[in-house]
Amino acid sequence: MSSDKPCEKGNGRRGFCKACIGAMTAASTAMVGYPVVSFVISQPSRIGEDKPLEVPIDQLTLGQARYEQWRGLQVIILATADGPMVFSASCPHLGCAVGWDTADSVFRCPCHGAVFTAQGEVVSGPVSDSLKQIPFEIKDGKIIITA
Ligand code: FES
């Protein structure tokens, strides 16, 4: 009879230790698993980022710029008499978003006053590089930007 008590106590301690190890394992799993699961769950919103940007040409107006978001970039599609042109809106100086000035037919950077032609070339300002042109193709009446 007395030999059962130590065994029971041993099982009690062993059980307690197992419970503690189980709790620590569960806590560790939760600490590692929660961020991993959260990351995986948040991914569906990024799935569409690989899709090309498609803009119907008939939605463009000659001499006007259209702004689009694509893969985290602000993209400007400018409808010119020679056809559409696509630029990154990021100013090559320090990255401010340039805007299209319809009245003067130039891009203007609001941060330090850089001015660019409709072809993205530098007119004036503290910048030496042109606006970055984004390659595109025209297919089925749409401008398609893939890269
Ligand atoms: S960021 Fe455009 S001129 Fe400085």
Image: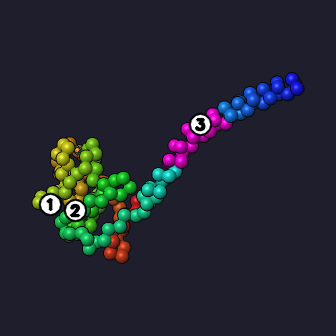
Residue at point 35%, 61% (across, down):
135
Tell me which image quadrant ligand 1 sits in.
Answer: top left
Return the residue nearer the eye: 130 or 13: 13
Q: Which numbered marker is on residue 27?
A: 3
Q: Where is residue 47 in the image (x, y as percent from the top left)?
A: 46, 58
Left or right: residue 144 versus residue 62 is right
Q: In which quarter of the image is the C terminus?
A: bottom left
Q: Which numbered marker is on residue 48?
A: none
Q: Which of marks 2 and 3 is nearer the N terminus?
A: 3
The residue type indicated by label 3 comes to Ala
127 versus 138 height, above or below: above
Return the residue nearer the eye: 60 or 106: 60
Determine contact: label 2, label 3, CB under 8 Å.
no
The residue type indicated by label 2 comes to Ala
Q: Which range is magenta?
A: 22-39
Q: Which of marks 1 and 3 is nearer the N terminus?
A: 3
Residue at image mark 2:
65
Distance, label 2 to label 3, CA atoms, is: 54 Å
Residue at point 24%, 62% (across, down):
66
